[in-house]
Image (cartoon, rainbow, N blue to C red):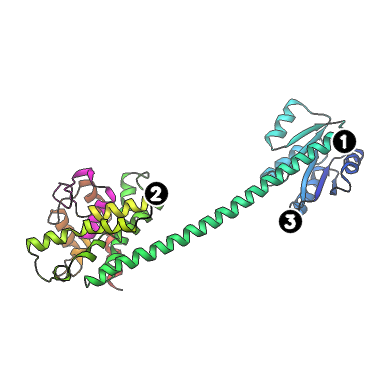
Amino acid sequence: MEERDTLLIADDVMINREMLKDIFEGKYKILEAANGEEAIELLENNKDKIALLFLDLVMPKKTGLDVMHYMSLNDMINIIPVIMITGEATVESDVRAYELGAADIIYKPFEPEVVIRRAKNIIELYQHRISIENELELRTKELYESKKKLEENNNFLVNALSSIVEFRSLESGEHIQRVKSFTRIMLKHWRALYGQKQFKDEQIELIVDASALHDIGKIAIPDVILLKPGKLTDEEYAEMKKHTIYGCLMLEKFKQEENEFYRYCYDICRYHHERYDGRGYPDGLKGEEIPVWAQIVSIVDVFDALINKRVYKDSFSIDEAFAMIHNGECGCFSTKLLDCFDDAKEDLIVVAKKLAQK
């Protein structure tokens, strides 16, 4: 940052400029303006060098208040302190000067030592504040970059872990991408239908990332069950259902802290097979006991399973999938969720067809 080593003295009376110049000569470089227009021109050309502006209230062409108004409009008033010098002040002019951002007002005739002390204090105060603001801006930038890097690393780990499940179950890794894309679509339609306060953009992205881990517990399911092409026995199905529990146990081991992202991961992993009527698993939750983000991932997971071929089934058409979900063939979903599902249908179809072409 360039050193501010210059004072600007704006006064139409030469003797007043000379008095202030004598006080500060040798301590600062001095610029002089005989009217408001000259002051504005000097401010524009030296705004990174001026440490303080001594500004007369009454001047030709533009007044001191006009100059301060210009400074306010051009983001100068917070970096260049202004001491108003006046012999014709009124309560109204003083109030207006302070409203426009004057740091101080000194009345003519002035005492040199008082002017020096006030000027020194104000310059130090402004420069200290600017230094703190610059340091804060730098630290904020560093924290943002660190957060961005951490998010990139987290996304890599999430995608890597979720892909293990996909490769093990002989499904394409596109299932995870479809679930994430469908989840984002549903969350945005849910927010549009039921209020902006439902989900902020940042929350949506966290939930979308968490949705990738919904089936992570399948890593613990034996191949003989996970890859079985036909119908599972009751015992095998009971073991398969435990993937929701196994997934949560894995998340517990990975957990570094109890935060919002972990809560979404845990809820989605554990509750994405719960159903609104209480007939899901593993806990038999019903109604709004099931977190809405888990409900959303639940319905898009079912939708994706229906429209894509699996080792144990052929694919259904999109219209067939919608009909089966509405008819309760895949479990019970809330009316609000089904309405949101219908509202999002066109966007879901576009993404489904686009991803199917890859």
The residue at which mark 2 appears reads as 200
Q: Residue furthest front?
A: 253
Between 104 and 166, the one lying in front of the other is: 166
Q: Residue furthest top?
A: 91
The quadrant in which the C terminus is found is bottom left
The residue at which mark 1 appears reads as 112
Q: Is residue 294 magenta?
A: yes
Image coordinates of residue 310 in percent, x first then y, are 18, 69
Amino acid found under the numbered disc labelled 3: Glu
Magenta range: 274-302
Structural crowding at the residue carrying mark 1, measured as other residues with C-alpha within 10 Å and reported as few (<14), some (14–19) or many (≥20)? some
User: Decide: marks 1, 3 in contact (CB < 8 A)?
Assistant: no
Q: Does the image show residue 171?
A: no
The residue at which mark 3 appears reads as 2
The first of marks 1 and 3 along the sequence is 3
Amino acid found under the numbered disc labelled 1: Pro
User: Decide: marks 2, 3 in contact (CB < 8 A)?
Assistant: no
Amino acid found under the numbered disc labelled 2: Lys
The first of marks 1 and 2 along the sequence is 1
Give the SS element for disc 3. loop
The quadrant in which the N terminus is found is bottom right
User: Looking at the image, is 219 positioned above or below residue 96?
Assistant: below
Give the SS element for disc 1. helix
Q: In the rendered view, does 165 fall on the left or right side of 69?
A: left
Q: Does the image show residue 119?
A: yes
Q: Give the residue at x 12% y 59%.
A: 238
Give the SS element for disc 2. loop
Q: In the rendered view, does 342 fall on the left or right side of 4?
A: left
- Tell me the mark number nearer the camera, choosing from 1 and 2: 1
Q: Is residue 355 magenta?
A: no
